[in-house]
Image: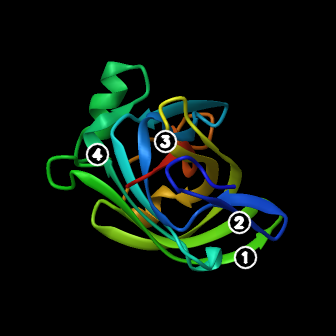
Amino acid sequence: MTSSTGSVTREWSGLTIPAAGTYLLDAAHKRVGFVARHMMVSKVRGEFADATATITVAEDPMQSSVTATIQAASINTAQADRDAHLRSPEFLDVENFPTLEFRSTGVKSWDGNEFVLSGELTIKGVTRPVELEVEFEGVGRSPFGQDIFGFSATTEIDREEFGLTWNVALETGGVLVGKKIKIEIEGEGVRQA
């Protein structure tokens, strides 16, 4: 399908996907969130309000790539004291490590509209391999004439592998903050001219 500006979508393996090109994460339509266990009995959810990403959709979609930067100080769990603690040297140490970074290293596999994106995540100066399970949500055109596509992605990391080791043992057994952190990302990519 060709749009009025010449941008195109294309068919690939039963999917309508965006044309090759550079897309930026739409700041108004994104969520970079996480879920952590608290006291072994509940979950705490939060997000990073300030995140940018460049998505390069390749002619061969399996060669597409992503780079992302998250501003560590933009962490928000809707509880000011907890957020201040998460920004402190005991966790993210935002003064010395102001950003979290992701760089994809390849599309590992795909099945229908689901892809596994391999990459490297850097938190607090420590870089580790991660795999994002990505769901391609579709492609369209906004009322403002922008070519967009939607996606969601999840992964789970062990925070201690990134040097985020602060914790408190509980009298009843276990710890205050779980080791495993689930990362949840939703967003729209907007084609650049």
Q: Nearer the viewer, mark 4 or mark 2?
A: 2
How would you rate the neighbour count of disc 2 (Cα within 10 Å): few for under 14, some for 14-19, many for 20 or more?
some
The residue indicated by pointer 1 is 109
Determine whether label 2 and label 1 are within 8 Å by CB: yes
Query: Which mark identifies residue 146?
Result: 3
Residue 76, x across and y down, in percent: 38, 29
Please name the residue shown 51% across and 37% down the image.
176
Determine whether label 4 and label 3 are within 8 Å by CB: no
Tag 1: amino acid: Ser
In the shown orientation, is residue 166 left or right of residue 63?
A: left
Q: Nearer the viewer, mark 4 or mark 1?
A: 1
Query: Which mark identifies residue 71?
Result: 4
Q: Is residue 58 above or below residue 148?
A: below
Q: CA distance from mark 3 to mark 2?
A: 24 Å
Q: Residue 134's quadrant in the figure?
A: bottom right
The residue indicated by pointer 2 is 115
Task: Locate the C terminus by quadrant.
Answer: bottom left
Q: CA distance from mark 4 to mark 1?
A: 29 Å
For residue 126, say whether it is visible.
yes
Q: Earlier in the sequence, mark 2 or mark 1?
A: 1
Q: Which is more toward the observer, 132 or 173?
A: 132
Q: Earlier in the sequence, mark 4 or mark 2?
A: 4
Q: Is residue 53 above or below residue 162?
A: above
